[in-house]
Image (tube, rainbow, N blue to C red):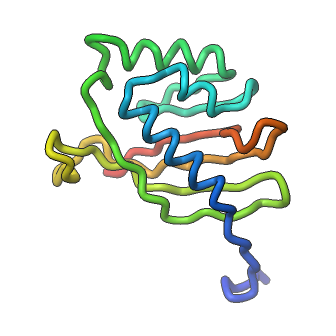
């Protein structure tokens, strides 16, 4: 018989995990694929908003460089990520679910947001701190 939610122990993720999400947001809004890629492990997997599966940090950097380049689809897009859930999956892994919302030029959340998504990140503690191991950006319809 499945256990009820009240019987499941969930340990909150450390602040460093939420800080990594914040650094991702900052890099996204700066159109900075170098910093964005540095937040991932070498062997990462990322599923984009459009459903493309990208394997490895080098290919992720290449994909991010294209979408953030002049004339790219994300060149002038600014987003915010609001954490909805973050928990440890053991001593060295955590999962974060955040709401992605597009911002207007004056810093307000876009009311009819075509890029609203649930952003799921599995993070791993490495020798250089927390890094994103797996990410998926799931559109909300």
Relative to 75, does residue 25 appear above or below in the rendering?
below
User: Quadrant of residue 12 in the image?
Assistant: bottom right
Q: Judge by depth and name the residue closer to the eye, 9 or 26.
A: 26
**What residue do we see at 48% from left, 32% from top?**
48
* Left or right of 1, for residue 20: left
Q: Residue furthest bottom?
A: 6
- Rendering quarter of residue 58: top right
Q: Quadrant of the N terminus?
A: bottom right
For residue 105, side relative to residue 53 (left or right): left
Q: Tell me which corner region of the image, top left, top right, bottom left or bottom right, holds residue 30.
A: top left
x then y, percent, for residue 140 = 36, 51
- Residue at image coords 69%, 39%: 131
Q: Position of residue 19 (x, y in %)?
A: 57, 51
- From the top left corner, tell me how far across and down residue 16 is, in percent: 65, 54
Q: Is residue 35 above or below residue 13?
A: above
Position of residue 52 measured from the top left corner of the image (x, y, whole percent): 51, 26
> What residue lies at 42% left-to-right and 58% top-to-bottom?
82
Please report the residue visible at 71 percent of the width from the left and 55 percent of the height from the top.
94
- Compare residues 15 and 4 and report the one nearer the observer: 15
Q: How many marks?
A: 0
């Amino acid at each position: 018989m499945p256990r009820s939610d009240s019987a499941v122990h969930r340990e909150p993720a450390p602040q460093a995990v939420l800080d990594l999400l914040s650094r991702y947001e900052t890099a996204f809004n700066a159109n900075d694929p170098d910093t964005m890629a540095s937040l991932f492990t070498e062997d990462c997997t990322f599923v984009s908003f459009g459903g493309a599966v990208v394997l490895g940090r080098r290919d992720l950097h290449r994909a991010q460089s294209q979408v953030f380049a002049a004339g790219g689809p994300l060149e002038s897009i600014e987003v915010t990520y609001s954490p909805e859930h973050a928990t440890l999956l053991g001593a060295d892994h955590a999962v974060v679910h955040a709401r992605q919302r597009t911002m207007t030029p004056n810093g307000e959340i876009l009311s009819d947001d075509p890029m609203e998504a649930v952003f799921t990140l599995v993070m791993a503690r490495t020798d250089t701190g927390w890094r994103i191991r797996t990410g998926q950006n799931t559109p909300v319809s």
